[in-house]
Image: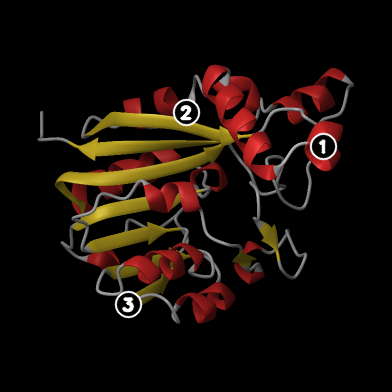
């Protein structure tokens, strides 16, 4: 996804990779205003926490990362950071702690069983009425479609075709494969963010404000074609 690239260029050893970026601004913007405690699963170098604290420095943010190197950066912005392999952990180190919000920003596509991780977090660590924010890349973003149509399916060092991605989602399948599989969760809102193919117009002719509005219009109209990332706001409902 945009801005997510391993700083050291090593993809084969996920424990040594450091993901640093400007933060997922769309995800952060969707946080409910009354949130006081946040669990950021796959927190990277703490970039989302850094953005959140610019608005509310009193919020408590706990992070989970696979990379010990990342945790060194993340601790500058977070209350606590746990170095954990989500593929094997039952998250028992969190005890009975329940959070107001849990963030999964471009992490579920990296784990072997994302439904298991979502279920553990929803059942044991998100309060009833709490918010879960899930962001995943859209594998059918138009640039990817062009590559597929021309016979190219290669993994890359970063982005939608990141070498460490184990799962691929689209606008139509993201909530069905993730949210709908966990009985404690209910989709509240889904939105896509991306761009339209303006090419020369964007680079040389159109002001940024105009091209941004055009992007937003076409992404809203055709989210599965022009959406680069899919973001879902999900509610934790009462036990059924």
Q: Position of residue 49 (x, y in %)?
A: 41, 67
Q: Are marks 2 and 1 in contact (CB under 8 Å)?
A: no
In-front residue for pair 135/211: 211
Tag shown at residue 106: none
Name the residue tied to disc 2: 174
Q: How far apart are the two marked residues, 2 and 1, measured between alpha carbons? A: 35 Å
> What is the tally of numbered marks visible in this picture?
3
Tag shown at residue 205: 1
Q: Nearer the viewer, mark 3 or mark 1?
A: 1
Q: Could you tell me if residue 170 is visible in this image?
A: no
130 displayed left or right of 61: left
Q: Position of residue 138 (x, y in %)?
A: 60, 32
Q: Nearer the viewer, mark 2 or mark 1?
A: 1
Q: Earlier in the sequence, mark 3 or mark 1?
A: 3
Kindly identify the residue that appears in the image at 20 percent across and 65 percent down.
Answer: 95
Q: Please say if 224 is above or below 104.
A: above
Q: Please say if 32 is above or below 212.
A: below
Dot 3: what SS?
Answer: loop
Q: Please say if 123 is above or below 5.
A: above
In-front residue for pair 130/92: 130
Q: Residues within 10 Å of mark 1 (few under 14, many from 20)?
A: few
Kindly identify the residue that appears in the image at 76 percent across and 36 percent down.
Answer: 206
Tag shown at residue 79: 3
């Amino acid at each position: 996804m945009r801005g997510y690239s391993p700083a050291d260029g090593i993809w084969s050893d996920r424990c040594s990779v450091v993901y640093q970026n400007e933060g997922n601004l769309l995800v952060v913007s969707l946080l409910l205003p009354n949130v006081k405690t946040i669990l950021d699963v796959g927190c990277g170098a703490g970039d989302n926490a850094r953005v959140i604290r610019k608005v509310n420095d009193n919020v408590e943010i706990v992070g989970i990362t696979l990379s010990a190197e990342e945790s060194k950066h993340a601790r500058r912005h977070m209350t606590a950071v746990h170095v954990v392999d989500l593929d094997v952990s039952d998250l028992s180190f969190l005890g009975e702690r329940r959070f107001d919000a849990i963030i999964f920003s471009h992490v579920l596509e990296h784990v072997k069983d994302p439904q298991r991780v979502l279920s553990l977090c929803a059942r044991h660590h998100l309060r009833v009425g709490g918010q879960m924010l899930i962001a995943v890349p859209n594998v059918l973003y138009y640039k990817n479609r062009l590559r597929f149509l021309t016979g190219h399916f290669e993994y890359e060092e970063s982005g939608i075709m990141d070498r460490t991605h184990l799962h691929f989602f689209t606008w139509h399948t993201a909530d069905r494969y993730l949210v709908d599989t966990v009985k404690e969760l209910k989709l509240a809102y889904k939105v896509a963010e991306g761009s339209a193919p303006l090419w020369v117009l964007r680079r040389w002719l159109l002001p940024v404000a105009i091209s941004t509005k055009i992007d937003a219009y076409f992404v809203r109209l055709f989210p599965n074609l022009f959406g680069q990332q899919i973001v879902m706001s999900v509610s934790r409902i009462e036990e059924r």
